[in-house]
Amino acid sequence: MHYVYSAALILLASCQMLHNPRFLLIPPGFPGLLHCAAMSTITGTFQLQQPLNYREGARVEPVDGDHSEETYEPATGRVIGKFLFSGEKEVDMAVQNAQAAFKIWSQKSGMERSTVLLEAARIIRERREEIATLETINNGKSITEARIDIDTSWQCLQYYAGLAGSLAGQHIQLPGGSFAYTRREPLGVCVGIGAWNYPFQIACWKSAPALACGNAMVFKPSPFTPISTVMLAEIYHEAGVPKGLFNVVQGGVATGQFLCQHPNVAKVSFTGSVPTGIKIMEMAAKGIKPVTLELGGKSPLIIFSDCVLENAVKGALMANFLTQGEVCCNGTRVFVQNEILNSFTKEVIKQTQNIKIGDPLLEDTRMGALINNSHLEKVLSFVKQAKDQGALVLCGGEACVPDDPKLSGGFYMSPCVLGNCNDNMTCVQEEIFGPVMSILPFDTEEEVLERANNTRFGLAGGVFTRDIQRAHRVVAALQAGMCFINNYNVSPVELPFGGYKMSGFGRENGEAAIEYYSQLKTVCVEMGNVESVF
């Protein structure tokens, strides 16, 4: 996808954001235009000023918050604020408030809901630069990627606004003039639990179909990235949803438990790790609540010798290094046919070494900082373990410090390519969730398919080949929910997204998501007399 925006509009949006007292991105008194023109001056200046919970149309502190956490700017390692975790009472108030809003929202027509969602999409589009900048500050990804995330966010709202007015049931003719019909009805108060790699986008992916179907939502962001989701709540409020329709509760494990176990929650949608997904499923099962789980992956990317090599190399980089490799559907097991192994590997190394690491708010940065120091150490330990097990580090795989002194405390590492890998290595079997690509040679299609499917995960998979019959044959055989032919990691909102096996179930995006945020009621109408067997 390609986007064209006026530089003047982006500059204006940036200036408006920098002088907004909610955010205080720069010290008061600095010339606004100078700071708008040089975005990197924002790095290291943001300080959190307002509460991050949102309930009944306003930012609030949790009524029973007895535990606070720090939130960081990954680019600098600097603490940018503290926020309170929500306890059981705050969760209950958020759910009750959402229930009241649901009673109003669920009675609106699809076209009425569509109008509000379109307005929310317009506001997101208008505030694109502001939201993307805060996403970069709290997540560490490059501003270039963050802008694309925000684009897919407003597109998601726009897409479901288009579907809202078309939601309908069926009419079924029965004997003797009797008939039946079905009604597609909302579920009630849904819970969304987000991940830290795409904070704002995930909140939109979950809330847009939920609201289009007439539901309310209480959303819990990851405690690592608490900042941007509350902006979505404000945008929904500004667009005209009833107060409380989209509430935000901050917190960790306990807060998530209170949400999943709340008797008035109708459904839970979770994006995150497999172990947490299992626990959420267990809690939801006790209340017979439906769940959508978008979990981890260890996806295969298969490169055949007849591919367009340039495209295959680009695809491999897209499959491994977006958002510092912190992407669940990444194709981190890169299977390369032996005939082109050397040429492919050489070009991948060359292009990986050219990836610019640094201040994520600079326009030419292509890789920012990992989410926090503990995660950085975890990813580096995977690289060390791979070396111990016989893999060769062909490039990268080390902690690095960009030249800018203000970035010295940031959580950076050089993107890593591993060679001499085999299927039994930990780096090939386990999700690393960092910028680490494992290259594995193969000979035949039959062999590589067996190896590609030999995993407990099934989120995604890809193939590069000029043989169109082979391409379709391979993706048909891959045990994965999202497959790519001659590309990777493109996710238009029109397409359903979700996994097989332990990567979860249910779908987000596309028309399929409607099925997971609504329920069918069947109504049977007798037009004659009742015939009784008694």
Image (tube, grey):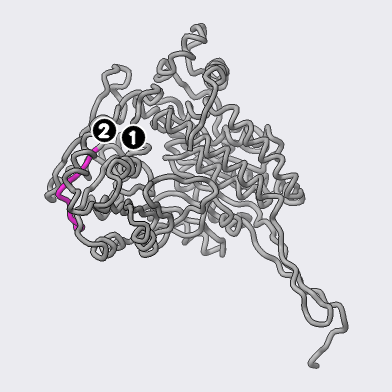
Residue drawn at the location 38% of the way across and 48% of the way down: 328
| 500 in relation to 533, above or below | above
Q: Visible in this render: residue 303? A: yes
Q: Amino acid at mark 2?
A: Met
Q: Position of residue 10 (x, y in %)?
A: 53, 21
Dot 1: what SS? loop
Q: Relative to 478, is 184 on the left or the right? A: right
The x and y percentages for residue 293 are: 47, 55
Q: What x and y, as percent, mark residue 240?
A: 71, 36
Picture residue at 81% right of the left edge, 74% below the top: 525
Q: Quadrant of the C terminus?
A: bottom right
On the image, numbered disc 2 is attached to which residue?
Answer: 413
Q: Nearer the viewer, residue 79 or 129?
A: 129
Q: Does residue 299 show up?
A: no
Residue 468, position as x, y percentages in the image: 37, 57
Q: Is residue 148 left or right of residue 418?
A: right
Give the residue number, with chain letter if any, for mark 1: 370
Above or below, comparing residue 350 to residue 38 in the picture: below
Mark 2, other Cα within 10 Å: few <14 / some 14–19 / many ≥20: many
- Residue 279 occupies quadrant: bottom left
**Which region of the structure is painted magenta?**
416-424
- Measured Cα–Cα span from mark 1 to mark 2: 8 Å
Question: Are the residues tagged 1 and 2 within 8 Å (C-beta)?
Answer: yes
Q: Amino acid at mark 1?
A: Leu
Of the image marks 1 and 2, the number of the one nearer the N terminus: 1
Name which residue lies at 17% across and 43% down. Answer: 384
Please, which residue is most extreme toward the bottom here?
534
Q: How packed is label 1: few (under 14 Cα within 10 Å), some, or many (20 or more)?
A: many
Above or below 211: residue 57? above
Q: Dot 2: what SS?
A: loop
